[in-house]
Image (cartoon, rainbow, N blue to C red):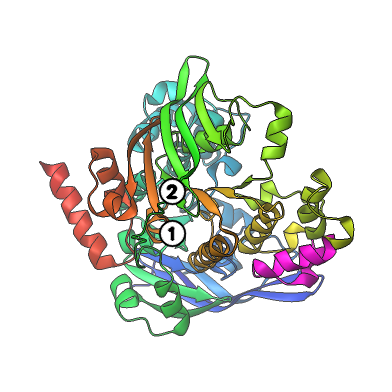
Amino acid sequence: MADPLLQVRNLSVTFQTARGPVHAVQNVSWQIDRGEVLAILGESGSGKSVSASAVMDLIDCPPGEITSGEIFYEGRDLLKMSRGQRRAINGKKIAMIFQDPLAHLNPVYTVGWQIEETMVIHGTSTAEAKAETINLLRKVGIPNPEASAQKYPHQFSGGQRQRLMIAMALALKPDVLIADEPTTALDVTVQAQILQLLEDLQKETGMALLIITHDLGVVAEIAHRVVVMNHGEIVEQGSAREIYANPQHPYTKRLISCAPGQGEIHDKVPETEPLLKVREAKKLYGAFEALSGVSFDLHEGETLAIVGESGSGKSTTARILLRLEEASGGTAHYKGKDLFSITPKEMFAMRRDIQMVFQDPTQSLNPRMTVYELISEAWAIHPEILPKAQWKARVATLLEQVGLQSEHVHRYPHQFSGGQRQRIAIARALALEPRIIVCDEAVSALDVQVQGQVIALLDRLKAEYGLSYIFIAHDLPVVRDFADRVIVMQGGRIVEQGPVRQIFDFPRDTYTRNLLAASLDPDPEVQARRRAERRAKEAV
């Protein structure tokens, strides 16, 4: 048998830290052949991205060190090559696209120049590189490629930026494309488009595709084989269908059982009086109408989900409710007062009742403040809530309520995992004893198990505190498990709203049906049927 195109054998990577060595990857072995799609599945910290970074020579040494192993490309050990030899392979033969394209695209250069640079560095003439750039932009679905090549990264949507990264990675026609969490923060329809694009390009070019992900739906949609990693080790591997239908390792079983969208739908919709009444809310940015006539009620003790693609207006709705931005029209009545028209002083007092948990706790938590300072800051701003002598005890109680330990009070945000940071953000929101919490994509970037834990925590806190949630999300299986009612938004308007079962089982609007059809199921058999149905419709 011929050697695999890319093979990792007994790879171990260790990072030296102030607390001692961290064994990020331990004796990992996997391989991928030309034309194959291999998924490395696992949670944050499992070692999946580190092993891929070792292939690309992207591990900082120090503090990282490859302590053992071999990485073969076409039978040659990459780890025994000189830096010059690796540079000739990286990008040209083995390319990589990353989770956050905005962080990996240079903001001061046009996207066309950045794609051209990839080819010019490897010996392509400037004229040929310019022509190929336009061709690549067209191939990955960027509209008006000639004009788009002259734009900067910030002028594109998240999905378009990921397409730009794919174009850059494909510029030199690599044999292996490594995609590190390429669809994590994207809407379901954009995610489906990116995965379809990757699959089409892989079939067209015959390249090997290595997908690094924590999303079982992505595995079910695109992978042929799966490697499951936990704590730096491979615990199981096999075909996507075998792993899902008959998992052997307890970790794999736990991962599959945590996949959202498998629980009972909340049938009971609260019959209480509306706590919040929004009528004909509007938001204009110049001549652009971001929100147009949005009306809905939020009941006491209810979880109201708002779903839709990027640009649908769901986050804008949240921002105007909290007066982070001013509404251009309409009303939002809470406790007999219109949130859109009350004075700043009245809104300051009202913010006690309406709090927000943001998508990225790394950005929403001040890195210079300890956990104690982050949570107790609310009482410094609203001193009437709690005497200072009780702050320490209350912080400890809040931390324990969100599943953290009271001794964590003197730590800083960077000393916690992503899921733990989101728990701190929730504790901070609870400090003011609010009646409404707006969760803006609060679990979208979390691993499936951590996501499940945070959702369970929010559910428990709702029962304990009598909270109401406005839950903004693009992850439809999570919404199905957690929400009581759903609002579907498109282009700044509500196209449909109703109880969860009605929206998911009997959607009336075409947009809602398309949104649900684009959502990924963790079962490869289900995804195979959906894919066949989708292709049959496209062929008509």
Q: Position of residue 108 (x, y in %)?
A: 63, 29
Residue at 79% in and 45% down: 382
Query: Is residue 101 within the magenta segment?
Result: no
Chief SS of the magenta region: helix
From the image, tell me which residue sits under label 1: 482
The type of residue carrying mark 1 is Phe
> Which image quarter: residue 206?
bottom left
Q: Quadrant of the C terminus?
A: top left
Query: Is residue 409 within the magenta segment?
Result: yes
The one of 393 and 361 positioned closer to us in this rendering: 393
Q: Position of residue 96 (x, y in %)?
A: 50, 52
Q: Position of residue 22 (x, y in %)?
A: 70, 74
Is residue 391 rendered to the left or right of residue 15?
Answer: right
From the image, tell me which residue sits under label 2: 305
Q: Establish if 375 lies above or below 392.
A: above
Q: For the residues labelled 1 and 2, say whether their Cβ atoms are less than 8 Å apart.
A: yes
Residue at 35% in and 32% down: 138
Instruction: Give the secondary structure at mark 2.
Output: strand
